[in-house]
Amino acid sequence: MKRNLLLTPGPTQIPPQLCAALGRPIIHHRTPQFQENLKEAVEGLQYVFQTKNDIYLIPASGTGAMEACVANLLSAGDQAITIEGGKFGERWTELCKAYGAKPEVVEVEWGSAVDPQVIKKLLDENKNIKVVFATLNETSTGVVTDIKALADVVKKTDALLVVDAISGLGVVDLKMDEWGVDVVASASHKGFMLPPGLAFVAVNDRAYKRAEQTTSPRYYFDFRKAKKAWEKVDTAFTPAIGIVIALCESLKWFKERGLEENFKNYARLAKGTQAAAKALGLTLLAKESCISNALTSINLPENIDGGKLVKIMRDTYGVSIAGGQGYLKGKIIRIAHMGVVDEYDILTGISCLEKVLKELGHKFELGAGLKAAQEVFNT
Amino acid sequence: MKRNLLLTPGPTQIPPQLCAALGRPIIHHRTPQFQENLKEAVEGLQYVFQTKNDIYLIPASGTGAMEACVANLLSAGDQAITIEGGKFGERWTELCKAYGAKPEVVEVEWGSAVDPQVIKKLLDENKNIKVVFATLNETSTGVVTDIKALADVVKKTDALLVVDAISGLGVVDLKMDEWGVDVVASASHKGFMLPPGLAFVAVNDRAYKRAEQTTSPRYYFDFRKAKKAWEKVDTAFTPAIGIVIALCESLKWFKERGLEENFKNYARLAKGTQAAAKALGLTLLAKESCISNALTSINLPENIDGGKLVKIMRDTYGVSIAGGQGYLKGKIIRIAHMGVVDEYDILTGISCLEKVLKELGHKFELGAGLKAAQEVFNT
């Protein structure tokens, strides 16, 4: 019964209403009843993805959605562009290599976003690029990519734009159809407030046509099988029934609150967290120009061990935030603003952060972080 | 609140205790707490798989587990044997072809099991066979394969034996280590009484070494990544946290009751169902010599529409059984004996079957099925 607040960037806190939905008795998936659930889920997702395209629901965690994109859209030997400004950008590169494709890697300093003009130049120079893989919200750094600007560049070429929106969808704006993004991949356990285990892939016609031509081996993740099944309001393979049913409840909340209100809310939470960090004498990892509203990455002073900080907050006080990944391990903390989290949750997180920073010897005025956030939340 | 009894061969009924576990608040997966869950889950699975081998937990439905086997154990051009005596045997063939492997297809009449001597002859004639793919319990027909006899044949060769035990594991006996099976694939939503969305693959050293040598593209399903993560009691990618936690509860039940008692129980349920079918003047699809204890497939008289029968039982009376698949569509019904189902559930199913058979004009003595089953259950 001890508090266990998740301010981690996936999984996020599951509200009790969705816990209850996850605990409902199971129904069989080849029934009119489940077809209603499937239709409701896809329609609700189309609202959040801001698209009229088909969205395939595949039981898998986020990496499965990413692999589905690579396996369907590239053949061995195909050239692609990947953008590495963090761990999840690197994953696109690794996936391309696993499929024998040739990624041209654009390296970006962690904490910075890619300059769309760099991508434009590469596409101008090399007409054989088949896909540009991007990341909406780089979870390892808290950087948001300007997907609209990237789409403006890519849509003028034959390349497809594929966006990993696993973290960030429903939290920051991504207008799939209006901006011209070809494929958007996401998953259940971040903005959608559900357990990991259900991946979503929205695919436009241009991308689907490519999937019909590529030769990479695929079966479970095959868009062609998914599309054929969806034409009969079915799934190619046994669906993640439990999560799909709970997803319908999650999506009602998106519809009730409205996407625009959602984006505003998370922006406010992010700004409050940023202000709190600064008031505690800390700096932010992500540059001002590309800082994400989905999570805030905070640099720690050299004398503070990030691993220890996260562990004490979680194990002693029941507040989970994330530490750093890759070379940032132990050096930063990450506080997520996704899903059901509200300003009182964020204040709880900041309060706990203040408590443990004090314990670890960091010098600051107690309450300064709370005060700074409170001011942002109430203007 | 209407009765909704699932006697379908996956998903199976989820007992309320597991529904409650599925509705618990989420915890983060990169924590000592979840590591305890992972360890408990793998140890419990090792008991049910009757193995000391590593078991990888991958968020996916059963087909994902099958694809993991093909992608890790075959390279393009490799030769393999598949056994087609139903829809799930055919899936192995399709998967092999998707990866550019060359399956030698052994066709078996639906309702019959493969003769291990046929496999022996093929292996004797062709030393290049890399893998034999088999199905423990063919869900489309209700036939059980003699995996022990098959293993006796395959283990004397360089070929690997890979068994799809998605349906049937924990229900009928499969001694992975003692019999010498190299890989066993299963999933959460049949014997384990959980929602679909979590796949299990147990891999012995011989198979793992093969996975290190093959060249098929893979990433999410890569055994090498799974093994490396498991060495640190972790998963390669975000796990299906909710199902893993509920799985620990499911596995306690296996341990408490004991596997041998489980096998005896399902055998009794199967025999009762078979007796009931015969008492209603119906015949069984699977031959006596290979009939499975995991589900009973019953042939319908020509004047009975199987689709209609299943629909009325489900929509009017709240009892779900399965119809036929492939060329058996509309011609058979399938009643599962997996998971939490007990003799009272089976009697409910038979009672409802009698009611609807009467409605549809089949001639028999009302109560004859119940009586026959009751006699089996009480001797």
Image (tube, coloured by chain):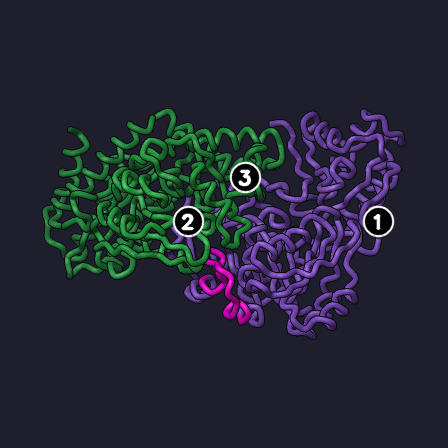
Chain colours: A green, B purple
Q: Give the image quarter of residue B98.
A: bottom right
* Magenta stretch encompasses residue B211: yes
* Magenta stretch encompasses residue A127: no
Residue A112 in the image: state x and y as whole percent: 20, 50
Identify the residue position indicated by label 1 in the image.
B379
Q: Is residue B53 left or right of residue B176?
A: left
Instruction: Identify the chain of the residue marked 3, using the numbered disc in the image.
Output: A
Q: Residues within 10 Å of mark 3 (few under 14, many from 20)?
A: many
Cα gap from disc 3 to disc 2, whole angstroms: 21 Å
Task: Tell me the tag on residue A241.
Answer: 3
Q: Secondary structure at mark 3?
A: helix
Q: Secondary structure at mark 1?
A: loop
Residue at 29% across / 44% down in the picture?
A336
Q: Marks 3 and 2: which is nearer the front?
A: 2
Instruction: Identify the chain of the residue marked 2, using the numbered disc in the image.
Output: A
Instruction: Identify the chain of the residue marked 1, using the numbered disc in the image.
Output: B
Residue type at numbered disc 1: Thr
Residue A312 in the image: state x and y as whole percent: 27, 55
Residue B39: in sight, yes or no?
yes
Residue at 42% across / 52% down in the picture?
B238
Residue at 25% across / 46% down in the picture?
A120
Camera-side residue of A131 and A60: A131
Residue A137 to residue B368: above or below: below
Q: Which residues are magenta?
A: B209-225
Residue type at numbered disc 2: Met
Identify the residue position indicated by label 2 in the image.
A66
Camera-side residue of B287 and B280: B287
Task: Tell me the tag on residue B171.
Answer: none
Cβ atoms at labels 3 and 1 below 8 Å apart: no
Residue B3 in the image: state x and y as whole percent: 65, 30
Q: Marks 3 and 1: which is nearer the front?
A: 3
